[in-house]
């Protein structure tokens, strides 16, 4: 006859072990999702659909939109995961990144790298089979640029790291256009330039807030190596260039009054907040610009979509 105490203890151990395994599996899944940095990917994909609408001169098929977004999500997610694998030695030194899964030990380096390469391969095959080869090549090309040019080379060696590295984040507009047209033209290149120029003030604002973090990790972000005044001047310059490029896009893509008015107002606000950063040189001013820069890009591309759909009679 089994002792009640022994039976109870064995049952409790079984339940505890099962629960622990489920918790561990859940942590692993959350860790893999965290590697992809989906909140960053979400902002990139916001630019994809409006570009597709302009390329189509109307609303593309739902299947094409979904296929492009799925492929783009995994391509960008794979690039982000590889970046975390590369940065696993410096992430523990920064307050902003100390809870990443490779730092906390939720995932091991091999797990992270295999996961990253797997989803990047999936992204290429998915885009090739469901969209077209050009979009697949552009997506993987952006990943390779991000990994080898930004993460492995410029990030730790040059204060121009985010300036040049920002090209990878601008790729979704090229991918979106290619998904529809299977070719490239001037409008997506103008949008590429806009996001390329938008990236430095966006990230420099964040770097002002986390200046000590970047300094501790020996990452030569511009606010660390050049100081707030020089950085503020550069942010104003780039924000003015973003404003100019956004207005150039109107005649190049045949945009209407809705877009032109929106670009004028949003660009003016972007420049104004950049001037505030230069004038006050405070974390508060920098974070106001950082927050608005996300709003700026989201609203500008939303207005692009609305303008095109209205003019196409959708």
Image: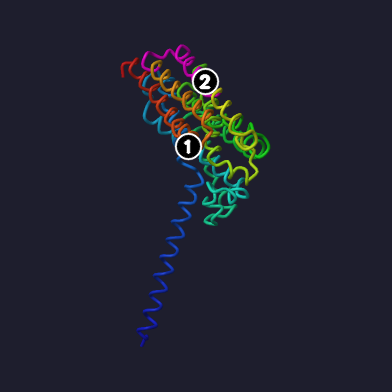
Can residue 171 be seen by looking at this rendering? Answer: no
| SS for dot 1 | helix
Residue nearest the viewer, comparing 271 with 189: 271
What is the x, y in percent for residue 154? 65, 35
Which residue lies at the image location 45% right of the left edge and 51% below the top edge? 30
Q: How crowded is mark 2: few (under 14 residues within 10 Å), some or many (20 or more)?
A: many
Location of the N terminus by quadrant is bottom left
**Which disc, if any, is residue 275?**
none
Q: Indicate which disc, 1 or 2, sits on the residue closer to the N terminus.
A: 2
* 96 drawn magenta: no
What is the x, y in percent for residue 84? 57, 45
What is the x, y in percent for residue 211? 58, 41
What is the x, y in percent for residue 55? 44, 20
The residue identified by callout 1 is: 284
* Residue farthest toward the left in the current orientation of the protein: 314
Say which of marks 1 and 2 sits in front: 1
Instruction: Look at the picture and state if 92 lies above or below 6.
Output: above
Q: Give the extent of the magenta segment.
A: 238-259
Residue nearest the viewer, comparing 104 with 124: 104
* 244 drawn magenta: yes
Q: Main secondary structure of the magenta part?
A: helix
**Which disc, if any, is residue 240?**
2
Q: Kindly indicate whether the residue at mark 2 contacts the one at mark 1 (C-beta within 8 angstroms).
A: no
Residue nearest the viewer, comparing 201 with 106: 201
Can residue 19 be seen by looking at this rendering? Answer: yes
């Amino acid at each position: 006859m089994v002792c009640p105490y022994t039976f109870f203890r064995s049952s409790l151990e079984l339940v505890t072990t099962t629960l622990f395994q489920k918790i561990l599996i859940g942590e692993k899944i959350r860790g893999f999702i965290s590697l992809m940095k989906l909140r960053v990917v979400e902002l990139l994909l916001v630019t994809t659909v409006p570009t597709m609408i302009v390329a189509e001169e109307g609303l593309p098929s739902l299947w094409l939109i979904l296929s492009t977004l799925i492929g783009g999500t995994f391509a960008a997610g794979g690039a982000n995961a590889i970046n975390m694998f590369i940065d696993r030695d410096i992430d523990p030194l920064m307050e902003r990144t100390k809870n990443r899964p490779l730092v906390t030990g939720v995932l091991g380096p091999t797990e992270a790298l295999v996961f990253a390469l797997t989803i990047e391969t999936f992204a290429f095959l998915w885009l090739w089979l469901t969209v077209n080869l050009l979009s697949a090549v552009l997506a993987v090309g952006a990943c390779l640029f991000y990994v080898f040019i930004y993460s492995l080379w410029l990030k730790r060696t040059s204060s121009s790291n985010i300036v040049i590295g920002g090209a990878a984040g601008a790729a979704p507009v090229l991918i979106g256009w290619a998904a529809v047209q299977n070719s490239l033209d001037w409008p997506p290149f103008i949008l590429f330039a806009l996001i390329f120029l938008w990236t430095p003030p966006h990230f420099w604002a964040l770097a002002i807030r986390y200046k000590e973090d970047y300094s501790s990790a020996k990452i030569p972000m511009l606010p660390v190596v050049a100081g707030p005044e020089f950085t503020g001047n550069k942010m104003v310059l780039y924000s003015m260039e973003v404003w100019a490029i956004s207005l150039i896009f109107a005649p190049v893509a045949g945009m209407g009054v809705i877009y032109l008015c929106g670009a004028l107002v949003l660009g003016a606000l972007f420049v104004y907040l950049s001037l505030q950063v230069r004038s006050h040189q405070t974390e508060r001013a920098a974070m106001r610009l950082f927050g608005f820069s996300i709003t700026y890009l989201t609203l500008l591309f939303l207005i692009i979509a609305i303008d095109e759909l209205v003019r196409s009679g959708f």
